[in-house]
Every structure is written in C-alpha cells, then in structure tokens.
Amino acid sequence: MPIQYDPEQEPYVALRTKALESLLIEKGLVTEEAVDEIIKYYEQDIGPLRGAQLVARAWVDPAFKQRLLHDSAAALAEFELPSSAPLVVIENTPTDHNVVVCTLCSCYPWMVLGLPPTWYKSFAYRSRVVIEPRAVLREFGLELDDEIDVHVWDSSADQRYLVLPERPPGTEHLSEQELANLVTRDTMIGVARAQAPKGVAAE
C-alpha cells in the first residue's frame, strides 16, 4: 500500500508517549507484552467490534438506522457507548461513497473504532485524500465507478465521522452477529467496502 507512515510526521504527544513507554519497560514497571495486550484490547476488542455491532444493527433494523444517522448519541446510548465528541454517521449508497480523514491531526471516533491505524495519522493520507480521494482509495484496493460521487469528511476535536457501509448483496440470510463479522475498521473509515462471505453470490 503506497500510503506509508512517516515517523518524522509523528505528533509530539505520540513521541513523548513512546519515550515514556520505553522508560517504564526499562525500569521494569511494565512489560512489553502487557503494553501489547492493552493495545490489542483497544484495537480489536473495544474498537472496531463495537462499530461493527452498530453497523450490523443498522443493516437489520431500519428504525435503529434512522436513529444512528440522525441522532447518533441516542443510538450509541442503546449500546451503552460513550460519546466524547459529537459523532456524525454518513451512509454509503450505490451513488455516493464517503471517506473520513482528519487533516489537522488524527481526530478519530475511538469509542467505536478503537485506536486509529498508523496510516490514518500519516501526512500522506491526511494531505492526499482530500485532493485525490479516488487515487488514494485505489491504493487501498477500492476502485469506484466514475458515476459514484466521493465525499471526504474532515474530522475535528469537536466532531467525528463514521461511515455506514453498504450491506453486501446476498447477505439477507445472515444473522446480526454474522453481519457484524463482515464489518471492518476500514469499511467504517471508508477506504474499503464490506464484502459478503466467500461462496455467497451477489444477486
């Protein structure tokens, strides 16, 4: 993937955090394994899984979908999720595709997606996706037809965005949990599409 993480563009806070982590490990106050477990918890358990549950519920429950799109705080409350900043949920459709970025730093809806990927924080992604979104999406392996409009949403400390991906065709028989398994962090940022399980043919 051409979008690379440039350590020279790493925010001061992130560099300070890494230095503190190294010092704590060196003094034997924490282990590297413990740090990895905490990161895994936020990346996999707390983060994308919660967002995936929201998306799957929206796919099977039209009323919840409307709440998620128009009153995300209420929808989050139903899942007992916190909302540190207003969350706007934007829906992908056959004619419109949305992608999220934070051009100033790396504001991110951590309460539903966990920790942001390194490429999301990179200068290359933050600067290029607003100028040439189709080219950037192509580098992620997402090729969009020319007829599809691409919209880029710029997150901030005051407002975060989450993409509601399209439900894959041919998944009408899947349970809500099975649908949640199809939703990834990247689909909720907008750099990928949710895919039906192998062996499921689109109608």
Image (cartoon, grey):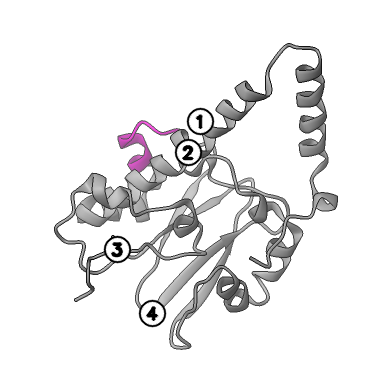
CB of mark 2 within 8 Å of CB of mark 4? no
Residue 22 screen position, x and y as percent? 79, 25
Q: Is 136 on the left or on the right of 144, as rendered?
A: right
**Residue type of the residue flagged with mark 1:** Tyr
Q: Earlier in the sequence, mark 3 or mark 2?
A: 2
Q: Is 38 on the left or on the right of 106, as rendered?
A: left
Structural crowding at the residue carrying mark 2, measured as other residues with C-alpha within 10 Å and reported as few (<14), some (14–19) or many (≥20): some
**Element under label 3?**
loop
**Element under label 1?**
helix
Quick one: which residue is furthest to the left in this view?
Answer: 173
Structural crowding at the residue carrying mark 1, measured as other residues with C-alpha within 10 Å and reported as few (<14), some (14–19) or many (≥20): some
**Residue type of the residue flagged with mark 2:** Gln
**CA–CA distance in space, label 2 to label 4:** 31 Å
Q: Which residue is mark 1?
A: 41
* Disc number lying in front (2 or 4): 2
Q: Is residue 45 above or below residue 166?
A: above
Q: Earlier in the sequence, mark 2 or mark 4?
A: 2
**Element under label 4?**
loop
Instruction: Examine the image and state in which quarter residue 20 appears.
Output: top right
Q: Which residue is mark 2?
A: 44
Q: Which residue is mark 3?
A: 196
| Residue 95: mark in rendering | 4
CB of mark 2 within 8 Å of CB of mark 1? yes
**Element under label 2?**
helix
Point out the stretch of residues depicted in magenta: 74-82
Residue 36 screen position, x and y as percent? 61, 29
Residue at point 34% right, 65% down?
A: 166
Residue at point 76% right, 19% down?
A: 25
**Residue type of the residue flagged with mark 4:** Thr
